[in-house]
Image (spheres, rainbow, N blue to C red):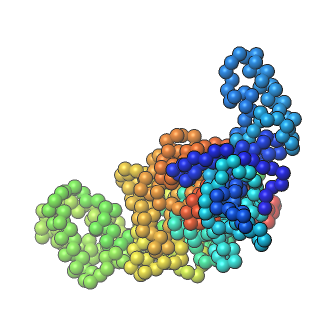
Amino acid sequence: MFVPDMEGTLMELAEAPETRYRYVVWFDYTRRAINEIQDGTLLAAPNFAGDPSTRRYSVLEVATVLPTHYALQGNAGGYPGFVVEAARSAAQDWEIQDTEATEDTTKIRLVAIPTNLEIIEPLSGEPTIGPESNIAMVGARVRILDSDYANRIANHGIDRERETNLTVIGTMARDDQVEILLRIEELYRTHFAIFGFTGVGKSNLLSTIVARVLDDATEPLKLIFFDLMSEYTVLLLDQLLGDRVSGRILTLGRHTLPEGLFKFINGQDGAPTLDEAARQLVRYSLFPKALTRHKRQIAFKLRDLVAHQRILYFQEAQSLTVYELFFTDRTPWNKDRRGPNIAKRLEVIKQVLKTVLPGGDYKQTTFTSNLARRIRQGLAGALERDGAFQEDYLLILAKLEELETTANETFAAGVTLREIVDDLNDRSHSSLWVIQAHNPHELRAFSKRLGEALYEQRRLGGLIDPLVSFVFDEADEFIRRDATGSYAESAEIAQTLARRGRKFGLGIGIATQRIRYLDTNIMAQPHTYFISKLPRQSDRQVVAEAFGVSEELLNQTFKFKKGQWLLISHDATGLEAIPIPIKTPDANLRLAEWLNRTSPER
């Protein structure tokens, strides 16, 4: 149960609003101890609920580790000669104490928080784990839990025998023997967030999360990835080409792809060869530095992506509904009018639609060339009879005229909004949609269209599965506070999904480094979050306030290496709302292994 030959003393206890209590523990300094005890180490301290027949140990988690030499009194004040000599003496004390503490002046000072669990050890029988029944005793001896018990504590709330929809997201940062399990459904249904500064590996972690859940999910899962920087073509290449998942890259707007590649996937005149189309995709794609040596292998896989028709084009004209054109802001009025004038303009449209589409469902009816022509002719006739607002309709008439040509224009790689929604509701397989756009405004606007269409269909049909997650990388570009224009569109649907989506099996994931720009109404919705270095105090304050985490706990992330995260979850982990420093797998290694296994160097 305990690491042998290593004990500390519980020295202080104080109330703390975020964690209930804050404990201070001293361990005798040795090199072995300073390497064994790290952030996230689990400790056991006898508590007041114990009795002569049963020992009860409160389980604490280390939040801060600080070796202290009391001869220096924690500062460099005083006469320099004395201070330097004391510091040199301290250095010797650090070096000579390998496995045995011989100096009373050296201690390891720990700050620890309760996990709200305790180990119950009867005089006879096996120990068990249960809810903490009292606080730890000041002055009691404190022991370090070994890997076996650390594993039991970290995953205590998860029933491995009965719960099947699980994945291993990584290991404890201090102990590779302790795997951290996540409930896949709770991770996505109750939303997740990733916060960290530039260079900590947010994209790498997102790639790992997507790969892990798609590989381990026992139920069909749908992921919609809004890829603002077009970097996930490579980072999720193994998933896009996998057999178990229907992987697709969806491009918005003709200019999102190189012209030759666009022509090739749609079988148009003047299209280049497959090899040339693939070369264009290679030049267009972003490669992680760690995969540079695998660029040739990746190029072959990108060629497969093109050849296997995994790149699709969103057919805007065939996806536009009558309702969107006339009763939303997708096509604005030529003149901005207020008050009763708006009602008069809409009444003209309603009368025309009643004639052309008697009893039609405007939200479900998409345009054909014939329908666009009939509505345009009917509207033009109505305006000739009453020309009071004729000038207001110029943009709408122009859009109808455009639809007469484009609504029947089909593309070999084309896909409509209705087809995407149908796939997201298909329970027979998992799907991954990576959505990219040359124009960020189009990507934000599309997120609202897709989110609303899926939400409404599920709400009206009472659908709750399969589980769908909308993942927003660079989330500050989608869910900004006080947003306007296309920013408001994506923020609106993100807020709808975050607040009301879970009852229909819809969740969101957000990743960003610019936390203070996020809509605070959405910030508080995720139940699972991964946090790395946040150098800006304003960002740390936002996270601390939104999730009830003390800044002292966040400070430990300053020491994290790339790939290390502070994981906190209310539902998805075994430890409820207790921060766990974890180490996640490197997505680049996963991709390199996959490339070597499926496409050896040619």
Where residue 535 sits in the image (x, y, percent)? 57, 40
Quadrant the N terminus occupies: bottom right
Name the residue located 61 percent from the left edge and 78 percent from the top edge: 219
Name the residue located 32 percent from the left edge and 73 percent from the top edge: 322
Relative to residue 417, is residue 135 drawn left or right? right
Where residue 548 sits in the image (x, y, percent)? 51, 52
Relative to residue 540, is residue 328 drawn left or right? left
Relative to residue 307, is residue 370 drawn left or right? left
Which image quadrant is residue 248 in? bottom right
Q: Is residue 42 something one can see in this rendering?
A: no
Residue at the outermost bottom position: 359
Which image quadrant is residue 521 in? bottom left
Quadrant the C terminus occupies: bottom right
Where residue 155 sits in the image (x, y, percent)? 67, 66
Where residue 380 sits in the image (x, y, percent)? 21, 69
Which residue is at the front of the view, 146 or 241?
146
Name the residue located 63 percent from the left edge and 44 percent from the top edge: 12
Name the residue located 54 percent from the left edge and 77 percent from the top edge: 466
Q: Is residue 9 something one can see in this rendering?
A: yes
Q: In this view, does 298 lie above or below 552?
A: below
